[in-house]
Structures are given as C-alpha cells and as structure tokens.
Amino acid sequence: DGGITQSPKYLFRKEGQNVTLSCEQNLNHDAMYWYRQDPGQGLRLIYYSQIVNDFQKGDIAEGYSVSREKKESFPLTVTSAQKNPTAFYLCASSIGWGGQPQHFGDGTRLSIL
Amino acid sequence: RKEVEQDPGPFNVPEGATVAFNCTYSNSASQSFFWYRQDCRKEPKLLMSVYSSGNEDGRFTAQLNRASQYISLLIRDSKLSDSATYLCVVNKHSGGSNYKLTFGKGTLLTVNP
C-alpha cells in the first residue's frame, strides 16, 4: 500500500540534544511538508519542499532543519535551538505544488526528558 | 479577522442527527478548500475537497460561498464513528509559485448513542 511512514511514533529529547524525525513516502509525490501541532492549536508549517533538492522555510522554521536529497525522504531535525519542542509532528505530501490536497503520515510525538 | 476561523465546539449530538459546521476565511484570493477529519491523537485525513458548485459524498455535503468567504460541512444521519475533530483548510495563491495551505483549529464533534 502506498503511504507516508513517520518514525519513531514517540521520541524523547534531552536538553541540548538534536533529534531527527524520519518521513518516507512511496506515493511518488513531488511536494513534502512538516507541520507541528500543539494542543488546541491548528497545524503550523515548519518547512516544505516543492521538489527534490529544494526546500523552503515555513512559518515557524527557527530551531529546525531539513534535507531533501531523495524524492521519497524528507527528514526533520529538531535542534537544541528549538526551546519548546514538545509537540505532535506531522509530515505530509502532495502530488504537486500549488494547492493540492495533502496526505499525512501518522505523526511523531516528541517530548522533553 | 483570523485567516481561517472555525467554531471550536464541542458539538454534542445524538446518533442520527444532522450537524453543520461553518468556517470563515479572510483572504479573498483563496482558491481551494478542503475538509479534513482528525481523530484523537491521530493524523488529519482528507474528508473532501470543496467545489464552487457544492459537492456531496454520501452523508457529507460541502458548500462554498465565495462572496461571504465561508465554507460549510453538513453531516446527515450522524454515526458514532463520525466523532472527531473537523478541520477547515484553505489554500491561497499569493503569486508566482507561492501557495499557502492554512489549517483551522478544528471543530470537535461528539456523536452520542
């Protein structure tokens, strides 16, 4: 079955540590996205990539980094500079860029130890 | 006015009831619209796109009113399994390759036996 796989489902970060969240899709989608969701809040865009080897900052990119070396993969690193990383992180993809509906992975919950 | 605004609810309805959600958006340049559902602690899933002429999918009807800048979702004959948070999503084209998908905070629906 085609889909988006995020791992791990749960992740704990120590102070000063960088952690990387994995996102892989086998839908052959060009565009990929990272969002964070806090309780009672809407999804906020962290980074997006329209095509392989390209990515752009979203609304809340500070303290995060990404790469897009392969079409299938869009990992997100939460750096120690992100002072409030506890959230539900969602990766999404869409067939193309330009308002296509997005399909989501099942998310990673990140907490601080 | 917020970019995308929804009544947070919660809406508590009995099985079999008809329930309607509204969503307003602030930017008249918005071009495409979607409803997603999100179960507790799960990822959002695309429920339906919203077309200018209105569209129906089984018990679900979506409508768009561009003049008043709102979209609606009507659920008929509510089932227990319809209990979820419903997210209104609006896409705006702001020139060139700049598109932005904005998520509302969601409306919580609980269908009671």
Image: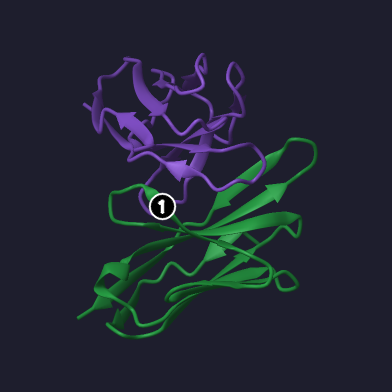
Identify which residue is drawn at 71% across, 55% down.
Answer: B31
Identify which residue is drawn at 33% across, 79% down.
Answer: B78
Quick one: which chain is purple? A
Quick one: which chain is green? B
In the rendered image, the quadrant that contains the N terminus of chain A is top left
A49 sits to left or right of B109: right
Q: Position of residue A2 (x, y in %)?
A: 38, 37
Numbered circles on residues, count? 1
In the rendered image, the quadrant that contains the C terminus of chain A is top left
In the rendered structure, which amino acid carries the disc numbered 1? Lys
Identify which residue is drawn at 25% across, 73% down.
Answer: B80
Compared with residue A37, is residue A62 higher up or lower down, i.e. above or below? above
Q: Nearer the viewer, residue B54 or B40?
A: B54
A101 sits to left or right of B53: left
Secondary element at image label 1:
strand
Q: Position of residue B40 (x, y in %)?
A: 28, 55
Compared with residue B29, is residue A26 higher up or lower down, i.e. above or below? above
Q: Which residue is mark 1?
A: B45
A104 sits to left or right of B94: left
Q: Chain of mark 1?
A: B
Identify which residue is drawn at 56% across, 38% down.
Answer: A95
Compared with residue B97, is residue A99 higher up or lower down, i.e. above or below? below
Neighbourhood count class around disc 1 (C-alpha, 10 Å): few under 14, some 14–19, many 20 upward: some
